[in-house]
Image (tube, helix red, strand yellow):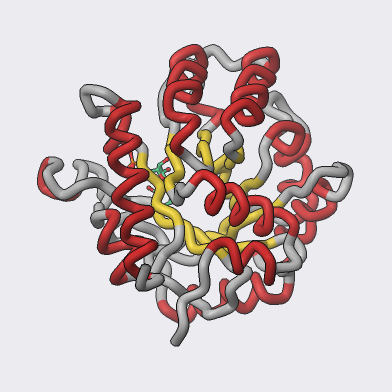
């Protein structure tokens, strides 16, 4: 089947969040998402400024920061505008609609105010998606959500049927759901983006960590498993020069994508 470029997919999709992301990917020639898993917000901001030019997405776990405050969030938003990347809060919502709606918009973090998109487990079904969507509708700018269709970690409980049902759920809510956290391509629908964590260059220690994370290489994820975006955390963070390493991941992932397009 014919491969379609990110640029063409930006044109095809009706989902505003997907459109924006595909446009950034094509403009910046980047299908790299940096997973900024650090405990210091100041360090996160420093990394966001250094790595920002080379990424399409910066992924946060806002609840692991030990110096969180809304002023620093505003600084991150400013950096996302300066460097033209999207902020993805990896919250992995998984409760009933009414609860996730509050978790998304309220509490300490007020995730809906500053994140461009979030993700959710599909386990709770359409009510969960509906709850998040209702909170997102308060905003003029596009918001979106990815469904977790697969996990990278060893011995996780997701099976083939769960993944298929997740794709179906996404199709039923494609005004809000614009893609998947997954390990391989799940649908030919060009509007859905496939975002893949568990990525490192293979020179890293034994392709796993001690807590069940499993790694594949950028080339494997993009060429063989036909994913669109790679998510890299420790592969960048634990390297000697994170900014330089990020550029290497960016170039490798984008070249793999071009190869898939036969360019
Ligand atoms: N993540 C995974 N696997 C999944 C879903 N999410 O690793 O299936 C997230 C983790 C972490 C990042 O929560 O933030 O992606 C991967 O980090 P790493 O590159 O340092 O392993």
Q: Is residue 127 visible?
A: no
- Closer to the camera in the image, 90 or 128: 90
Which residue is the extreme one toward the front?
A: 263
Q: Is residue 32 visible?
A: yes
> Quadrant location of ligand 1?
top left
Give the side of residue 81 with respect to residue 254, left or right: right
Residue drawn at the location 36% of the way across and 37% of the way down = 233
Q: Is residue 234 above or below residue 130?
A: above
Give the side of residue 95 with respect to residue 235, left or right: right
Residue drawn at the location 38% of the way across and 63% of the way down = 258
Residue drawn at the location 34% of the way across and 53% of the way down = 253
Q: Is residue 57 above or below residue 263?
A: above
Q: Position of residue 77 (x, y in %)?
A: 66, 26
Say which quadrant the N terminus sits in. bottom left
Q: Position of residue 55 (x, y in %)?
A: 47, 39
Q: Is residue 4 above or below residue 102?
A: below
């Amino acid at each position: 089947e014919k491969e379609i470029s990110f640029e063409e997919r930006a044109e095809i999709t009706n989902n505003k969040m997907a459109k924006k992301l595909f446009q950034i990917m094509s403009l910046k020639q980047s299908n790299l998402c940096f997973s900024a898993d650090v405990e210091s917000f100041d360090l996160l901001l420093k990394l966001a400024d250094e790595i920002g030019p080379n990424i399409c997405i910066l992924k946060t776990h806002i609840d692991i920061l030990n110096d969180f405050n809304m002023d620093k969030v505003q600084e991150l938003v400013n950096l996302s505008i300066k460097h033209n990347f999207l902020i993805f809060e990896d919250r992995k919502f998984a409760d009933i609609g009414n609860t996730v709606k509050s978790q998304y918009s309220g509490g300490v973090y007020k995730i809906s105010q500053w994140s461009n998109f979030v993700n959710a487990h599909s386990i709770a079904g359409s009510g969960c998606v509906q709850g998040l969507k209702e909170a997102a509708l308060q905003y003029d700018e596009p918001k979106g959500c990815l469904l977790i269709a697969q996990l990278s970690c060893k011995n996780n409980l997701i099976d083939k049927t769960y993944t298929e049902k997740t794709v179906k759920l996404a199709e039923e809510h494609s005004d809000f759901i614009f893609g998947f956290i997954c390990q391989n391509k799940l649908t030919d629908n060009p509007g859905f983006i496939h975002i893949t964590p568990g990525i490192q260059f293979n020179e890293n220690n034994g392709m796993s960590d001690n807590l069940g994370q499993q790694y594949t290489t950028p080339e494997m994820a993009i060429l063989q498993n036909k994913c669109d975006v790679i998510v890299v955390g420790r592969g960048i963070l634990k390297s000697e020069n994170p900014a330089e390493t990020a550029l290497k991941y960016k170039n490798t992932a984008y070249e793999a994508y071009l190869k898939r397009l036969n360019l």
